[in-house]
Every structure is written in C-alpha cells, then in structure tokens.
Image: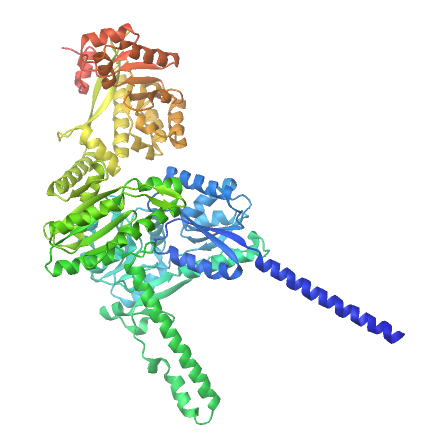
Amino acid sequence: MKNNIMLRGMWEKVLLLIIMFFSLNISDALAENEVRNVLFISSYNENFITVPYQIEGIKSVLLKNNVQLDVEYMDSKRFYDEESRRIFHDLLKYKMSKLAAYDAIIVGDDNALQFAMDFQEDLFNGIPVVFLGINDFKRAGLANKNKYMTGIIEETSLKENIEIAYKFNSKATRAVAIVDNTLTGIGDMEQFYSIKDEFKELSFEHINTSEYTFEELENVLENVGDDTILLYLSMFEDKTGKNITIDEAVEILKEHTKVPVYRASIGGVGNGLLGGKMVSYFDSGEIAAQMVMKILNGSSVESVEMVTDSPNRYIFDYNIIKKYNIDEKLIPEESVLINNKVDIFEQYREYIIITLLIIFFLVVLLMVLAYDAIKQRKIEKELMESHEKLDKIAHYDFLTNLPNRIKFKECLKEEIDKGISGAVIMIGLDNFKKINNTLGHEYGNMILKKITDRLSKIADEKHFVARHGGDEFLILVRSESKQELFRCINLLKNLFHEGFVVDNRENHMKASIGVALFPDDGTEAEKIIANADTAMYKAKQSGKSNCLFYTIQMKEELLARNNIETVLREALKNDGFKLVYQPYMSSQTGEAAGYEALIRLKNHNIPPSVFIPVAEECGLIINIGRYVTYEAVSQLRKWKQQGYEPKPISLNFSCKQLKDTQYVECLKKILKDNEIEPEYIEIEITESILLEKAESTMDFLYNLKNMGIKIALDDFGTGFSSLNYLTYIPMNKVKLDKSLIDKFFELNNLSAVENIISLAHSLNFQITAEGIEELKQYESLRNIDCDYFQGYYFSKPLEVIEIEKIYFNKQE
C-alpha cells in the first residue's frame, strides 16, 4: 500500500512537470508569434549616404526578434522650416491614427530628435523613444532627462583625426576644417574649435563653403599648402544656395586638393579621400536597436543608460597612403585599409610555419587548417561582393537602380573625348513637391519608380538614362542626327500622356524638358549638364510642360541676376541704398496724413520691381527689410528732434521676410532706441503672405498688432480671395490697388468700389486708394467716403529734403 502511494505521488510529479513544460513552450510560442512594431524617423531621405547603413544596423537586430520596422523620412536637408515640420507632423499623426500603435520610436540625427521632443505629448505620449546619430550633445543630454528617452550620441573623432594627421605630417602648422552654414555644418564647426586648446602647435582655421560658389571654392582648395591638415566635415551648400551630395563634394576635393583630405564621417574614402577615425553608422543602428529590445523585453527606459562612446574606427585608403608617402608604421594596428592588396603569406606567416612543423604529427590540425582555408575563401568572396556593392552604391541610384549623376557624367565625358556630337536632355517633373507634401514621400517614391519603368524602355545604345536626383532625370543622346534627337524628345513627352497608377489612384504628371547640345553648348561634362539644367528651369518658368533648348541668352539672364545680387550685397555693405517717401493724403483735411517709405539704389538705375525679386530669391530681403525699418524710424526721430509734427510711415513687408523670426524683437529695439511710439509705424503686407493661414504668419501679425503697430493690406483686389482675408487678418487699413480702381472706372461701376469701402468701414478698417492720377478719380472716391488717397496726382515719391520743403513749410 505504501509503495502504491509513493508510486502515485511520483506519477503526479511527473504529470505536473509535463504540464509545466508544455505551458512554457506554448507561452514561448505565443511570445514568438507576437508582432511588435517600431517606427524609425530619419532626419533625411533614403538617398542620404548614412541612412541605409543606419537602417541595416537597426534591421539586423529587430528582424531576428520578430519586430516590424516602419520608416518615415523628414528630408530636412532639403526642406526644414515650420511649414515642412507641420506637414510632416500632420501626415505622421494621420498615419498613426490609422495604423496599429507603435511599441517604440527610433529617431535618427538631431532634427528628428528635436521633432520627437517638440511633439512628444501630441504624437508619442508614453511611447519609448531611442535616438542615434546625435551631434548636439546638449540636445542629447536634455532628451535623456526625459523618462521616456534614451539613446546613443554620435561623437565625431576630430581630436583623434588631428592627432593621427599630425603624426603623418609632423611639419604641419595649421588645421583647417571644411564646413558650411547648414545645421550639421554649424555643429561641426563648434566641435572643431572646441578642441583648439589641445593643439598649441597648430593654428585652427576653417573654410566655409557657404561663403563661396563651388567654382570659387575650387580655387581656394588648390591654394591649400603642405603645411595644412585638411578635414572635410560639411560641404552641402554654397553661397548661392546650390546643394551638392557627398559624392559630388568628394569629386571637387579629389580634383582640387594637393594634400591628403581627412574624413570623420562616412563617404569618400576609397574614392579620393585619405580617411580617418569615423563613425560606424551600422554599429550605431545596431546599438540603438539593442536598446529598443531591452525596453521591449521589460526594462524601463530610465534604466537603459545613454551610450556616450560613439562606435568609431580608423578607416584609410591605402592608395592615398602610398600617394603621399605616409609611413605605414604610423597607422594604428586596428585600422581598416581600403584598396590594400593583402599578402596572404605575410598575413598568416606564423600559422603557416607552425602548420609546416607539426603537419606530420597532427592530422587533426590539418583538418582545422583546411576548414580555416575554406572560411578564408568565404571571407574573400564576401569582401569581393562588398566591393561590388559599394561600387553600385557609388554609381547607381538607391531608389530607382538607374545610373546616378556621377555615372552619367563619366559616360558623357567618354562621348566628348571621342569627339562625337550629341545632346543631354534634363527632365524635371512639374509640381512634384505637391505629391510629397500631400501624399507623402513613400507615395512619391512609388511614382518615381513608375516613371523610371517607362524611361527605362527607351534606354538603348543610343540613349543612356540616369537619375539626376530628386524629381529630375537625365538622357544622353548618342547621335548627331537632329531627327533622332526630336524623336527622343517626342518619346519623352508621350511617356507622360497616360497617368501613373499607384494604390489604385491615377496620377497625371507633367514634365519640363531642357536640352543642351555638345560640343555646341560646351565641351565639359559638368558645363553641358548645367546648361541643360538651365534650359529645363527656364522651361518651368515659361509655364511648365515645355521643352526648351539652351541658349546663351539664358546664361546671360542668369549672369544678370547674379550681377544684381552682387550689387545688392555691395549696397548693404557700403551704404548703397536710400529711402524716398510718397505721401498719402487725408480726405478730411486735404493734407498729408503719412508717408510710404520706398527703397532705391543710390548708384544703380535698377528699379525695385527688378531687384526686390532677386533679393527675395537669394535671401538678402531680410537684411534689406531691417535696413528700411532702421532708416524709416531714424528719419522719424530726426523730424521729431527738428520740431516737426510726427506722421506715420508705412513699410512694405515681403512674404520672404517671414523667415526673419527675430524681426518683431528687432523692431521693438529700433523703436525704443529712437524713442518713437509704435503707432507711427505701419506694416504693409500683400495677399501672397496670406495664401495659407499658417499659424506662424498669424502669430507674427498678432505680435505686431499687440505692440501697437498698424497693419495694412496692400494691393487689395489683385488676388482671388480678398474679401475672405478681411474676416481674419488683424489689420487697420485696406489699400485698393490701382488696377482695381481703373477697372471699375472703365466700367463706370463705382457702386462696386462703394460696396467694398462700406464693407471695410463696417469692419472698422480705413481705406486708401492707390494710383490716383486724375482729379475725377479723387473727387468720385471722396464722394463715396474713401479715407486716404495716394498717387502721382498728389505727389511722386520724394527725397527727404523735398518732403521737408513741401510738407513741413520749409520753402524758401
């Protein structure tokens, strides 16, 4: 009986163990089948050189752990302002409202981290956020204080690179960094000068590419001497706003430097740059993904400490080592040497000698060495495949698999060297930005792939098709026949007759085409491509969906525009501007009620209608706007000191000046310094500022209104929704455009103008009639209660001395 009880107890224990075993396995199986979702937000786009490596590193960890990865691109290298951030925010918020919730967010680089910090409560409330690729250590530290944020910083090894460079060239007397004015470039410059005190023997200098055109930069680089340690940090834009890729920057450096170029980040090593200690973006992605897995497996975000040791390693181009006769003994042992043909015997000398000594005694060791040889061959094969992959990355577009701009340039140069005539066709999609802004970059990429499929069908031995970048494509026509060229152009036009269907949605796309002939339009590949680009943009300016051939006049127009920009820059430096004032008259008193300040060039007969658009395009409008503000307020102070009755001055405000986020504070300071009340300044805005009721625009107008500045809507009647603007703009005055008044006088329909005036008065707005040139216009408008009048009937714009003589009773 006792044995039966013991036996039954033993079976109960065995049964319990079996149940526990199957329960654990079922739980593990369920856990393995549970799909978790992670979103990666990149600051840039899929074509930016670091992004694919970051994604590969992240996927190497997440995919094997059954974690689904989604990717969204901010594309902040090309679009980074409040509007683009708002559009990206709205699109992401919409997607997140429709998709399954994310278990964690990974953000790549500084702009994406700042976005996550700004909109954490709105978009990512309670969701763990892991960052990587962060250059701004203060931002990383601030984010790490948030209980839902941690990550890995990206510390550029500038100190180590200068140290190794100084070992390689002990005669160096200065360290020079190549930077630009982008957000990345500013951070790079700060890091560079932060280590200056650690190198007393070197002078620290920088070359800012945003202060030169790329052509001017080439001359600067060619003058860099052997006493210089040259570091390439950032080189994305020049002073004209032109942007280039890292590959294009490397081409310039390779062709125009006489010293080794050091690099602390990916790109260029193996293609002409020496290299240095670099960030491994794959390793950074892998570490960030491992941190995510710790959190998903139960660790709190606060317990996962921020990684401050950036995964950097030395990488050098062996060809450049040889080119500059650098002592190989100085190269750190852990370095990776690209283009180095390794001598197998030298690399495995000890193993081979030992193997020869003991091969007769140990058969097992022979088998181990055979296995090692097989493994080595596998590594060599993987290295060869890796080189082929790197070559494809360098010469083919990541998204479309078409040859890229570098490959196209090489093929064009070959044709030019053969002395063959032909043509380069540049295709630019019209309004493609609207697709990306409304439907998202992923959707836009699918359309680009559809367009690529059609373009690829015309590719043959006579037509070489490539992607120039963004929404632009290049065609190389290898034929002297004009008939063949026009046949190709017609084929390209026909490609866009039918819509492109993506996600069951038909998208009708149009394209502008520019054509440059060689050798007629140039004998250098870069120049021919630039000329085709000029013709394409001229086609866009001429109404889009056009095809234009390059002409010298196009270049002359570009030169004229550049000359005007030079004149404006010179005028800002050397007091080359002046203000004239046109009075506006009161219908009640018949006297001048105030003056409109109008800017002029002192030494050039270029009208504002010509130079203002150029100033807006090149960004000088902000400095010009501040000049006008300062001069007008200063003139008010002078008149006040001379005892004249102060009267308001109105200033014209361009929509491009909205980028001057410090304008309101600047205006406050100018008024305070000159002891002028805000009520004597009136800001005139146009309807172009109000095409979208952007929150930032309305905040700007309300800030002006709240400080006592008067606001006038200028050129009223030239837009499409003028009456709608009257309902929400915080303004004081409406200025009726001359074209509107002339039209109603021509139609003998003053009742329409009277209705507009009545509506404005009902909303407590005053009315100014612009462009008054005849007595009957003045009398008719005065009879229907128009408040103010301005035009040549009363006065043209006058110099200050004429204003004082006529309106301040200074006549002799």
Work out which residue is located at the far right of the displayed protein and give it: 1
Does residue 381 lie above or below 579 as drawn? below
Residue 319 horizontal side relative to residue 150, left or right = left
Question: Could you tell me residue 345's position as x and y percent?
Answer: 34, 83
Residue 16 horizontal side relative to residue 469, left or right = right
Does residue 398 lie above or below 431 as drawn? below
Does residue 219 lie above or below 165 as drawn? above
- Quadrant of the image occupied by residue 572: top left
* Residue positioned 29% across, 9% down in the render: 751
Question: Could you tell me residue 358's position as x and y percent?
Answer: 44, 91
- Quadrant of the image occupied by residue 347: bottom left
Q: Is residue 739 visible?
A: yes
Closer to the camera in the image, 320 or 771: 771
* Residue positioned 43% across, 61% down in the render: 283
- The way the protein has been coloured in the rendering is rainbow
Question: Could you tell me residue 641's position as x and y percent?
Answer: 27, 18
Closer to the camera in the image, 115 or 39: 39
